[in-house]
Image (spheres, rainbow, N blue to C red):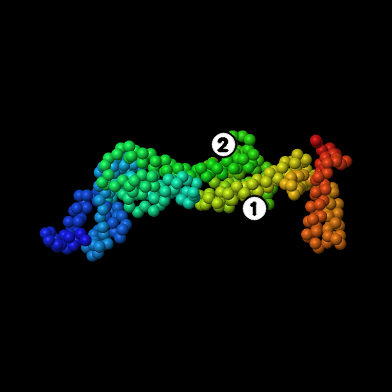
Amino acid sequence: MLYQKLEQPPYGVKPGVIPVLLAAFLLVHVDDIGIYKDGTFIPVLGPEHFELLVKEPSRFSVKSFEMVGLRSQVFRELETVLKSPNAKAPAGVRNASLLAVAKPLFGFVRQLPEFTKSTKRLSAEARNVLQALQTAQEPDALLFVSLPEACGFNPMTTGREENEQEAKAFRKKLVQCLHEIQTAYDNLLADCQKHLYEAFGVRSKEANLREDLRVRASYLVGQCIDPVLRHFVAKAVEEDLPDRDWLEALIRIVADKHPKVWIDEDFSRFEMVLSDLVRRFENLESLWTEIRRQGKGFDALRITVTEPNGQEVHEVVWMDEEHADLFERLAEEVLNTPALKDNPRLQKGFLAKLNEKLLSRKDVDSQGELGKPKRKRGQSA
């Protein structure tokens, strides 16, 4: 279109001269005229572009970035919060002033975790801003059209008159949305930490969660067969990681997925899996506490019976070494009785009924409390 106008009267410019004139014009207007190839903004115009411009000028277009009126005020407001005071534009970069403000926004959205890009745990305005940043292709359209509309303002067109109040209000709202987006992942980690704190019943300040878990888990190192619980215990006692990395590692073990790539549904799954993991952790913790208290010469199992009404009975059952053979022989005799032999369903039913009868007894046997072993001669209380 431009070539045709320049070639026609009253200009009559030869086709070979037009690229030279265009280059001179672009050099003069290096800051307020943008150039696009196939609709894509070109920040650095090189020789390869001019070679293509001579052969296929229809693939290029230009756009005015003139900063006047309201646009000028908005640009100055955004400069105060987005432009780095020490930033220097690389040699040859066009539209350096505009890019100095827009480039940090493009970099900001690129470094966001996948969770932040997909989560709905943001206000409607923050989600609109995030979408504008993710889909932006032209820096001027981003700053003066997409972002104002995302924040609830009218587009800042070149024909609009100055309005300092509107410019400042837009800057304030945009900063609020950017802060909300930036802290979305931090808030997720904080919520997960709160759930860890509550699930493990840590009584100290939340900041001491790590130390509390480290001490409790240290007694279980080497005692876990379950791979998830073993991995959790090993990470809980690790002291080299920074606090944030340590927390992310625990969350990843529980959810089997790094929180940076979560979707919102993964948080609900984290809550459910955490509850089960804590139950297994505390059962093993209680068992080994009793084992350490009783000393050597005993083995122990922690048995839990859940009744239909939801009530649970927990009991640590002790087996001293001198009766191990007796227990083994009796177990084989019971399981090999004609009524139970080779019938796992009935065997488990018998086990359930036996646990129910024993663990619900209120009487005290000759040893004292049910399941509490007599101490061996010479063993301290």
The quarter of the rendered structure image containing the N terminus is bottom left
Mark 1, Cα crowd under 10 Å, few <14 / some 14-19 / many 20+, is few
The quarter of the rendered structure image containing the C terminus is top right
Q: Residue at x 25, y 43 (%)?
A: 68
Q: Residue at x 42, y 40 (%)?
A: 176
Evaluate if marks 1 and 2 touch, with contact meaning CB atoms under 8 Å apart.
no
Residue underneath mark 2: 207
Residue 66 vs residue 201: left or right?
Answer: left
Residue underneath mark 1: 227
Mark 2, Cα crowd under 10 Å, few <14 / some 14-19 / many 20+, is few
Q: Residue at x 84, y 52 (%)?
A: 327
Residue 87 vs residue 30: left or right?
Answer: right
Q: 105 and 323: which one is in front?
A: 105
Residue 257 placed where, x, y %? 55, 52
Q: Give the mark nearer the N terminus: 1 vs 2.
A: 2
Q: Could you tell me the amino acid type at mark 2?
A: Ala
Q: Could you tell me the amino acid type at mark 1?
A: Pro
